[in-house]
Amino acid sequence: MNFVEELRWRGMLHDIMPGTEEELNKGMASGYIGFDPTADSLHVGHLTQIMTLTHFQKAGHKPYALVGGATGMIGDPSFKSQERNLLDESTLQKNVAGIKAQLENFLDFTGDNSAIMVNNYDWFKNFGFLEFIRDVGKHITVNYMMSKDSVKKRLEDGSGLSFTEFSYQLLQGYDFYHLWKNHNCVLQMGGSDQWGNIVTGTEFIRRKDAGSAFALTTQLIKKADGTKFGKTESGAVWLDPERTSPYQFYQFWLNSTDADAKSYIRIFTLLDRETIEALDAEHDAAPHLRVLQKALAKDITIRVHGEAAYEKAIKSSDFLFGNVGIEFLSELTDAEVKGIFEGVPNFNISLAELQEGINATELLAGKTAVFPSKGEAKKMIQGGGVSVNKNKIATPDDIFNADNLINGKYLVAQKGKKNYFLIIVG
RNA sequence: GGGGAGGUACCAGAGCGGUCAAAUGGGACGGACUGUAAAUCCGUUGCUUCGGCUACGAAGGUUCGAAUCCUUCUCUCCCCA
């Protein structure tokens, strides 16, 4: 199966320039995707693009990952309502390095079609303004640039955009030219919001060197209910285990709705069509077992965080959501307990405080920050939404003392069903 | 520069002298039901030592009493130049 067919059955393909498929069928081709260094870690929203590159490489092509050290200084106006703050250079350097390190986990950097990482800062840093407007600006008309949806939208809604942002598409267009000229990159890929920028590149290549280059975009991932993909209450889901623990990462995927899981498993895993269709069928037959969600979460967690982290996430999940009682903890060593609660927020309180006896609101909102205020703790306790050691707290005045400790040092607090907190005495 | 409209809780948006910690909708959170789904239903959604305290762009003022009236400042939007 060729690259484009692969994307197509997975439901990833959004738009493709005529001739692209034919070009790729000729043999090994080089193509690239750009990543914006707005943070020092990628998040799950970037996974679509990472998977696109992965499929590209698996189909025998040579993938380039471009980190936008230069374009990141400008900011893409595409479909953003406001100009973004410019990042300073040192932050940018740090972000580029972080992203680079993560991308290395997904792509194969060995072999004939080894992946290559480039940073557009390298070819822009010594590119003078006069030189740029003469060699690049000359080939693209303002009319053409203004007709882009991303620009048009900003003009129409009156918010306007700075010259800096307006220039963005030229920079991205030049990136494509540079890679086409020097690395024989004939294809740029990206999310569907990047179509305009990508096409500026192919247009530039055509006008400047009469060359031909191609464009392909992927579907923007949305949840079935129309809300944004990749966000939880606590913010974006990052690939960096420091920002989003493997346990939280695993849970994020496991909690996908049925409809979402069906599309995600196609987009975010490398499982083949037969396997996925078999899982679909199995899931439909017994949806409560959630085989799709489990397979999805497993596949991605292992690829992002490794087998060991996945095993840990499973153990934590089994304990936190399974039917095991709280006594289970007493059978574990300290290290095992720590492992289970890795990624669960924890708080420390002193043994002395606990020995005096402490009421529920004070414990959860005063001594620890399970709740931001006592009022809120009280309300939720009254609403029946708080448990300690897997037992519901009946009233806000329930007293806890050293007798409630598990293994002599832990209390497990639960806000709702899914939010756990570990209180450690010591 | 001239004229007009307006800034209310996470957002949208009522209120226009007391009964307003502020309608309604959305979101968020919690509960029930379930499969750690979806849909639905219910509850909560400023802080509190439960006496109060702090809040309706900011600062003053009028009043027994202000989100509501007055003054100044500030910001946003619209129209004209």
Image (spheres, grey):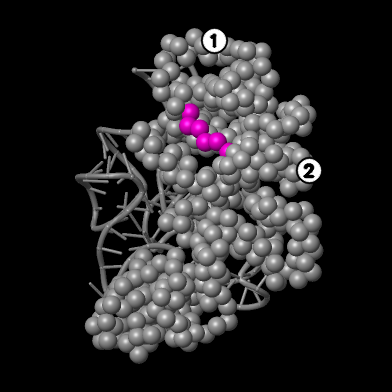
Callout 1: residue from which chain?
A: A
Work out which quarter of the rendered image holds the N terminus of chain A and state it.
top right
Work out which quarter of the rendered image holds the C terminus of chain A and state it.
bottom left
Residue at the image position 76 percent from the left and 29 percent from the top: A26
On the same chain, marks 1 and 2? The answer is yes
Residue at the image position 50 percent from the left and 32 percent from the top: A118
Q: Is residue A128 left or right of residue B58?
A: right
Give the number of the disc on residue A289: none
Residues shaded magenta = A115-120
Give the number of the disc on residue A1: 2
Image coordinates of residue B60 in percent, x first then y, are 19, 45
- Secondary structure at numbered mark 2: loop
**In this orientation, which residue lies closer to the viewer: B14 or A283?**
A283
Dot 1, crowdedness within 10 Å: few (<14), some or many (≥20)?
Answer: few
Q: Could you say which quadrant of the image residue A72 lies in? A: top left
The amino acid sitting under disc 2 is Met
